[in-house]
């Protein structure tokens, strides 16, 4: 295509709750394909892919998502936003398939994804691999303009205590260096890499030996995730995948002191587990009525649960590392801590003394920088600057 432009100048934080009202539209239609192997239930990467695709569609882009498997939750959300989805399978995948995602050394999954693209007959201006697990697709790049949106080198999962819980998984961890070396080699084939946080950008410089061209945070649907009037504020909430032994032990201790609800894959003694919540409306209601959201992970590149909680006006307690430290201003929209003792002390104090209404207002205001609108505009700015489309 000849070119396109972003219509209304630099991105700025919204002053209202709207994700849509001031979204700049493209002067010409940009065709974008998002690529991944598997977008499963409750996945942050899946939510991020669909939300950015929806934002680009609102900006007058022609957007499709290609995947080998996509959970109906994400297919429905994407198609409601006018995004085409090409995914022959649905539902969840088995444990062996999860290992397969990390070890696509024979390029079987990448070859299947390439066939899916070719059989569609569609061509695009930009192809975005939105999951590091699908790095091997670069072997079938051809003349495609290919971007990696990195959420953290996936080989690091192999040495993460939250993942390596079983003897089989610990045995698989010995392949860490091989996976890292292979992914480092594959990353050289991308035309551009963008990161989902400052931490992800720094890690990419080590793992991929490339400096990402910019940061595109995970977009939050701030229309769906928003405050409620008169929140009950009678429980703490922890959301997401397992945090590892130390994080879950911390949550178990806190559950003996305050009412604690968990959502997602967390299974912590003494809590009220709700499992995976597929409805954004219901999940937002749970966030918005919590007094606090507890994020006990030490290795989070971004932290969707942190951003969504803030969008709902609920402050967050988290360690002063990684993605959460880029979103939380301690004492203003949450609390950043450095030790387990400090973590427990903050939670106990907040439940005893409460906090001013301005904390919820600040949480919402600061979260708007991660709205679909603002993230989409930053993505388009980076494309225009670096690829000169």
Image (cartoon, helix red, strand yellow):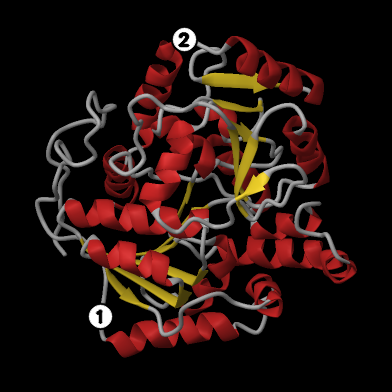
Comparing marks 2 and 1, which lies closer to the viewer?
Answer: 2
Picture residue at 52% right of the left edge, 58% below the top: 43
Above or below, 96 relative to 186: below
Circle 1 Cα neighbour tier, 10 Å, few/some/many (<14 / 14–19 / ≥20)? few
Secondary structure of the residue carrying tag 1 is loop
* Residue 376 % position (x, y): 29, 45
Left or right of 122: which side holds 319? right
Task: Name the residue nearer the viewer: 89 or 211.
Answer: 89
* Residue 264 % position (x, y): 59, 53
* Residue 305 % position (x, y): 52, 41
- For marks 2 and 1, give the CA distance: 53 Å
Residue 136 seen in the figure: yes
* Residue 355 % position (x, y): 52, 12
Secondary structure of the residue carrying tag 2 is loop
Above or below, 117 relative to 245: below
User: Where residue 122 is drawn, which disc sits there?
Assistant: 1
Given contact means CB atoms under 8 Å apart, are the residues at marks 2 and 1 in contact? no
Picture residue at 33% right of the left edge, 27% below the top: 229
Work out which quarter of the rendered image holds the N terminus and state it: bottom left
Identify the image quadrant of residue 322.
top right
Q: Which residue is mark 2?
A: 356
Picture residue at 80% right of the left edge, 55% below the top: 159
Above or below, 92 relative to 262: below
Residue 215 seen in the figure: no
Work out which quarter of the rendered image holds the C terminus and state it: bottom left
């Amino acid at each position: 295509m000849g070119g396109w432009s972003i219509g209304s100048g630099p991105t700025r934080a919204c002053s209202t709750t709207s994700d849509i009202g001031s979204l700049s539209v493209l002067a010409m239609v940009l065709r974008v394909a998002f690529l991944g192997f598997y977008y499963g239930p409750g996945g942050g990467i899946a939510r991020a892919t669909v939300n950015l695709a929806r934002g680009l569609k609102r900006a007058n882009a022609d957007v499709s998502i290609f995947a080998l498997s996509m959970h109906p939750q994400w297919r429905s959300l994407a198609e409601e936003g006018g995004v085409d989805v090409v995914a022959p399978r649905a539902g969840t995948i088995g444990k062996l398939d999860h290992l397969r995602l990390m070890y696509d050394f024979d390029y079987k999954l990448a070859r299947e994804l390439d066939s899916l693209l070719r059989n569609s007959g569609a061509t695009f201006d930009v192809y975005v691999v939105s999951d590091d697990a699908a790095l091997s697709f670069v072997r079938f790049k051809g003349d495609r303009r290919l971007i990696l949106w990195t959420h953290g080198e996936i080989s690091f999962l192999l040495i993460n205590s939250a993942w390596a819980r079983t003897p089989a998984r610990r045995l698989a961890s010995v392949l860490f260096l091989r996976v890292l070396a292979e992914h480092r080699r594959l990353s050289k084939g991308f035309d551009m890499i963008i990161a989902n946080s400052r931490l992800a950008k720094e890690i990419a410089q080590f793992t991929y030996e490339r400096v990402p061209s910019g940061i595109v945070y995970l977009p939050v649907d701030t229309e769906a995730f928003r405050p409620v009037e008169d929140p009950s504020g009678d429980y703490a909430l922890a959301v997401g995948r397992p945090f590892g032994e130390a994080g879950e032990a911390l949550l178990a201790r806190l559950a003996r002191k305050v009412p604690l609800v968990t959502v997602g894959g967390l299974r912590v003694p003494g809590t009220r587990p709700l499992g995976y919540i597929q409805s954004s409306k219901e999940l937002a209601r749970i966030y918005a009525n919590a007094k606090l959201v507890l994020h006990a992970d030490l290795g989070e590149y971004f932290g969707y649960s942190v951003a969504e909680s803030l969008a709902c006006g609920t402050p967050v307690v988290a360690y002063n590392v990684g993605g959460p430290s880029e979103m939380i201003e301690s004492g203003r929209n949450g609390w950043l801590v450095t030790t387990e003792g400090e973590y427990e002390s903050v939670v106990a104090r907040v439940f005893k003394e409460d906090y001013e209404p301005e904390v919820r207002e600040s949480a919402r205001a600061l979260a708007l920088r991660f709205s679909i609108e603002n993230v989409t505009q930053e993505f388009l700015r980076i494309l225009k600057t670096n690829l000169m489309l």
